[in-house]
Image (cartoon, rainbow, N blue to C red):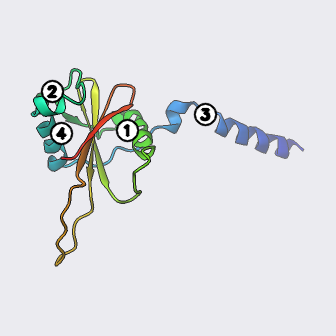
Amino acid sequence: MKTLFAAALLLTSCSLRPASTLTQRACPPTTQESELRVRNLLSLPNLAQSKVDFGSASRDSVQPLRTEGDRAVCGTLWNAVEAQPRRARGRYTFAFHRSGDRYFVTLTPPPVPPGRTVLRHDHAVEVYDRDFRLLERFGI
């Protein structure tokens, strides 16, 4: 009886962990290309800012999210990215960046196999606010 009670208590305590520990997830690797795509988006203020307010984000303050200290933010961004309805799992490679009070997620499709020619328009940068709400998706 004590063993059964202890097992039930253990199961209950595991399911009641704080949300902050549930959302911590490793940041995806970033590349120079993904960072350059975010910087390029922030270099086109007339085009981009006509659709979305970039807040305090700037081209010069783009930082990749990749350290252990960024895990909570990356976990929350993973949840936001995976909640998008049009997302095909496994189709894209993601990279996460921060600039000012905005978060940027780059989406990169898989490489084209040798010998095939594919016309692609599915590279994108998504902009999230400080509350991790998707503001806009730009095809870049």
Q: CA distance from mark 4 to mark 3?
A: 35 Å
Q: Dot 4 lies on which element?
A: helix
Which of the two labelled residues, at mark 4 and mark 3, occupies the earlier sequence position? 3
Which of the two labelled residues, at mark 3 and mark 2, occupies the earlier sequence position? 3
- Position of 13 with respect to 120 (left or right) is right
Image quadrant assignment for residue 108? bottom left
Marks 3 and 2: CB-CB under 8 Å? no
Which residue is the site of mark 1? Answer: 74
Q: Amino acid under label 3?
A: Arg
Q: Position of residue 58 (x, y in %)?
A: 15, 27
Residue closest to the eye, 31 or 82: 82
Identify whether 95 is placed above or below 52. below
Which residue is the site of mark 2? Answer: 58
Q: Which mark is residue 66?
A: none
In the picture, the quarter occupied by the N terminus is top right
Q: Amino acid under label 4?
A: Val
Q: Residues within 10 Å of mark 1 (few under 14, many from 20)?
A: many
Q: CA distance from mark 3 to mark 1?
A: 19 Å
Residue closest to the eye, 8 or 137: 137
Which of the two labelled residues, at mark 1 and mark 4, occupies the earlier sequence position? 4
Q: Residue at x 22, y 26 (%)?
A: 54
Q: Amino acid under label 1?
A: Cys
Q: Which mark is residue 38?
A: 4
Q: Residue at x 21, y 34 (%)?
A: 63
Q: Nearer the viewer, mark 4 or mark 3?
A: 4
Which of the two labelled residues, at mark 3 and mark 1, occupies the earlier sequence position? 3
Residue closest to the eye, 13 or 39: 39
Q: Amino acid under label 2?
A: Ser
Q: Position of residue 101 (x, y in %)?
A: 27, 23
Residue closest to the far bottom: 115
- Position of 64 with respect to 10 (left or right) is left
